[in-house]
Every structure is written in C-alpha cells, then in structure tokens.
C-alpha cells in the first residue's frame, strides 16, 4: 500500500489529497452527515493496518515525537512566513476536527465490537496536550473513555471499576506522558495554545462531588470524558457510604442519564 501511487498519509493534508482523489460518491453525498461519513471512511482506508506496520518506534531526532505527530502539528504551517492568529486558529480547528473524526471512529468500532461479540471493551485516551498555563497534575487532565452504557446500566458495581481504571490511567500513565509531551513541545518551540486539548479540565472546588462515572458528552453516546482526581482522593472517596454516579436508563427508546 505504501508504494501505491494513491497512498496518502492519514493526516489533515493527506486526507485533503485523498478527498481530491476520491470525492464522496453521489449516492452517499445525499445522506445525512455525508461529509463526515466519507472522511471517516477515507481515514480508515489510509490508516489500514497501521497497528502492524512496525513503525511504532520511529522518532524525530530533534523533538522526540513520531514523524506523524510532527506532521500533524505542522498542519498549515509555512517555513517562509509567519501565520496570523486567524490562520493559527483555522489550523488548530482543522487538526481538532481531524482528531475528533479518528476518535469517533474508534468509539464507533469499540461499540460495534461489543455489540457483535457480547464482549467487554474499555478504551482510554489522553491527547498529550493540556490547556495553556495549566499545571500537569492528575486533577488537570481528562481521560477520554469508551465504556458500554449497557454494562453501566446492568452492573452499577462496575462504576467503581471504571473510575479506578480511569484514575490509574490519568495519574500514572497520562500525567508523566503529558509532562514529556510538554518538554518535547518546548524543545520544538511549539506554543501550548497550538496543542491544547479541546476538552480542557474545568475548574472545580470539591473533588468529593465528582461522580464515579459522569454522563457521556451527549446522552446517546458511549464517549465519556472523565476528569482526573488528586492522588489518593478516589481511594478515600470509595470508603464513603454513599457514592455519586450516573446510571443510564431507557426512555421511549432513548438513553437518558
């Protein structure tokens, strides 16, 4: 595939080139959200077998990121002229939209995998970046989580497990990697505003009031954004007699929380 003349990188610019080569078919173009559906399909085509391509350890010698990371954050940048604030925002928005398509692809496939197999999947992701001028601590990070709402509805006891998995991931995996991400950004001369998470952590005053599992980002979704907590606060919270969490319910065929 890599030697095929139609092969493109699954980046913002690569997708634009692929769209020029393969415009949305007419019988799809008339359907709802046809543009998003077609972009999703093309990204999947361009990234097919990425998980077995043996390129996982590639690294840009200058900044320490994978070459695709560098290409992604250089979207729309010019070596010859400085970008205006408007252009920088447009580039950030293009990258954000692109990553959201990929994230939604993953969530769709996790959902499909569970529905087809009857199995169980948990997916966690942190984008590396944090909000500008934020401290890199667990309570300032979010975990993007896929969890099956049917499991959450039928097994309330597993809300604790999701909270524990998410906190372990945020505190001990995402936090040190976010620190490394910030170091690499500094070495590369990238501004924090150009790499920030589109779901920044909200200010809060009482971590004890955080639910174990919050509602998903939309009621019918399986995409949860679970805030990190200060170290050891979840352990203390679980000793309380009453715990706050959100249970999905079916209401006339729709999911409510």
Image (spheres, rainbow, N blue to C red):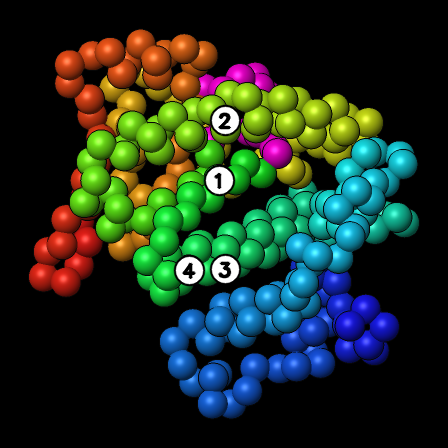
Q: Quadrant of residue 178?
A: top right
Q: Nearer the viewer, mark 4 or mark 2?
A: 4
Residue 13 can be seen in this image: no
Going from the N terminus, do you reach mark 4 or mark 2 first? 4
The region drawn magenta spans 128-142
Instruction: Give residue 113's mark.
Output: 4
| Numbered disc 1: secondary structure | strand
**Distance from Cα at disc 1 to Cα at disc 2:** 9 Å
Mark 3 Cα shell of 10 Å, populated few (<14), some (14-19), many (≥20): some
**Distance from Cα at disc 4 to Cα at disc 1:** 16 Å
Instruction: Give residue 170's mark.
Output: 2
Q: Is residue 147 left or right of residue 25?
A: left
Quadrant placement of the C terminus? top left
Residue that carries the numbered disc 3 in the rendered image: 105
**Distance from Cα at disc 3 to Cα at disc 2:** 22 Å
Q: Position of residue 97 (x, y in %)?
A: 55, 55
Going from the N terminus, do you reach mark 1 or mark 3 first? 3
| Numbered disc 3: secondary structure | helix
**Distance from Cα at disc 4 to Cα at disc 2:** 25 Å
Quadrant placement of the N terminus? bottom right
Residue placed furthest toward the left: 252
Seen at 25% across and 19% down, the residue is 209
| Numbered disc 2: secondary structure | helix
Viewer-nearest residue: 183 or 50: 50
Seen at 46% across and 44% down, the residue is 123
Seen at 43% across and 85% down, the residue is 30
**Is 123 situated above or below 211?**
below
| Numbered disc 4: secondary structure | helix
Residue that carries the numbered disc 1 in the rendered image: 124
**Distance from Cα at disc 1 to Cα at disc 3:** 14 Å
């Amino acid at each position: 595939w890599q030697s095929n003349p139609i092969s493109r990188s699954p980046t913002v610019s690569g997708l634009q080139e692929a769209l020029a080569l393969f415009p949305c078919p007419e019988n799809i173009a008339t359907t709802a959200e046809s543009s998003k559906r077609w972009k999703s399909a093309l990204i999947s085509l361009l990234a097919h077998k990425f998980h077995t391509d043996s390129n996982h350890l590639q690294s840009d010698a200058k900044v320490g990121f994978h070459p695709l990371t560098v290409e992604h954050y250089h979207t729309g940048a010019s070596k010859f002229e400085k970008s205006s604030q408007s252009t920088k925002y447009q580039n950030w928005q293009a990258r954000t939209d692109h990553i959201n398509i990929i994230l939604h692809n993953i969530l769709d496939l996790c959902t499909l995998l569970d529905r087809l197999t009857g199995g169980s999947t948990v997916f966690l992701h942190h984008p590396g970046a944090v909000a500008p001028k934020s401290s890199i601590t667990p309570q300032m990070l979010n975990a993007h989580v896929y969890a099956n709402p049917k499991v959450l509805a039928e097994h309330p006891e597993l809300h604790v497990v999701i909270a524990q998995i998410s906190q372990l991931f945020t505190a001990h995996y995402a936090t040190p990697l976010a620190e490394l991400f910030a170091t690499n950004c500094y070495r590369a001369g990238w501004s924090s505003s150009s790499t920030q998470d589109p779901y920044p952590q909200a200010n809060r005053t009482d971590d004890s009031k955080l639910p174990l599992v919050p509602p998903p980002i939309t009621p019918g979704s399986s995409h949860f954004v679970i805030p990190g907590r200060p170290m050891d606060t979840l352990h203390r919270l679980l000793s309380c007699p009453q715990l706050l969490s959100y249970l999905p319910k079916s209401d006339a065929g729709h999911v409510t929380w």
